[in-house]
């Protein structure tokens, strides 16, 4: 389903709070699940499959240090290892810092620093090439799909006339990504415009898709920078 992203007031009842040198506190009974990346015969990601849905809780804590023994939930290990969780986020707002690729019938925004490395952008060629050739309806569809599957929101396909983002109709939820190529903890995928509150009490720009670091290694905390692939 293709939908232009509008104001995300429906997500305001939910909130993710970043605890200083500690976990993510999830408020509002936000749904949490685990998804696995599915690959084709050429080892290119093609889709996500739902693996497990966790019982809903009004408040829960998810690991940020990458060393919990009860993933994805926090078990207090961050205290034992003296986890250093200082935030070093990428510049905001996204639209002002993302590179623009103007295709024949789409605009693609690309904030490279947010790349978490899963690789859906390589499906069907590449999102960039598909965007350039987006006067072809099938290539346009694939450009939109591959950008929507980018969990970090590095890539965003926009309508060429209105420049509004085109997003799937996802409801607010958090998915723990499972990638069989990775030994370390993959990030937490926030969908549906979930507010994220910094350790200092301020809020990050609300975006429809973001990935939060859960391996503890990212250099752009709280966001994922793909460092789990090398941890």
Image (cartoon, rainbow, N blue to C red):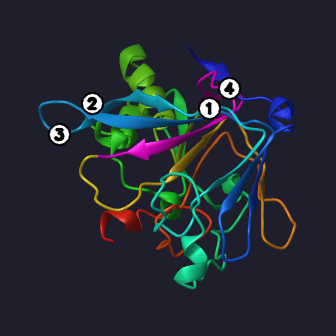
Q: Position of residue 3 (x, y in %)?
A: 65, 20
Residue assigned mark 3: 43
Name which of mark 4 and mark 2 comes first in the sequence: 2
Gap in Å between the C-alphas at discs 2 and 1?
36 Å
Q: Position of residue 118 (x, y in %)?
A: 36, 48
Name which of mark 2 and mark 3 comes first in the sequence: 3
Residue assigned mark 1: 55
Residue assigned mark 2: 124
* Residue at screen point 52% across, 26% down: 105
Magenta stretch: includes residue 199 = no
* Residue at screen point 84% across, 73% down: 200
Q: Which residues are magenta?
A: 159-179
Tell me the tag on residue 145.
none
Left/right placement of residue 97 relative to residue 145 reads right
Left/right placement of residue 152 relative to residue 191 reads left
The kind of secondary structure element at disc 2 is: loop
Tell me the tag on residue 171.
4
Gap in Å between the C-alphas at discs 1 and 3?
32 Å
């Amino acid at each position: 389903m293709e939908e232009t992203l509008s104001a995300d007031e429906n997500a305001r009842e939910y909130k993710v709070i970043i605890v200083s040198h500690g976990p993510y506190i999830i408020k509002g009974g936000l749904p949490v699940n685990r998804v696995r990346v599915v690959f084709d015969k050429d080892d290119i990601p093609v889709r996500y499959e739902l693996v497990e849905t966790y019982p809903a809780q009004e408040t829960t804590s998810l690991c940020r240090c990458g060393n919990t023994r009860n993933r994805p939930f926090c078990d207090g290990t961050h205290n034992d290892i003296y986890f250093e969780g200082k935030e070093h986020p990428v510049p905001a707002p996204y639209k002002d810092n993302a590179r623009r690729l103007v295709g024949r019938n789409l605009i693609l925004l690309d904030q490279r620093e947010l790349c978490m490395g899963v690789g859906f952008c390589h499906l069907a060629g590449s999102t960039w090439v598909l965007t350039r050739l987006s006067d072809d309806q099938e290539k346009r569809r694939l450009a939109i799909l591959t950008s929507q599957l980018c969990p970090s929101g590095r890539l965003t396909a926009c309508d060429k006339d209105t420049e509004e983002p085109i997003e799937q109709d996802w409801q607010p939820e958090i998915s723990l990504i499972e990638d069989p190529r990775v030994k370390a903890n993959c990030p937490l995928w926030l969908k549906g415009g979930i507010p994220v509150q910094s350790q200092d009490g301020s809020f990050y720009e609300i975006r429809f898709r973001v990935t939060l670091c859960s391996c503890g290694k990212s250099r752009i905390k709280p966001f994922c920078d793909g460092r789990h692939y090398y941890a």
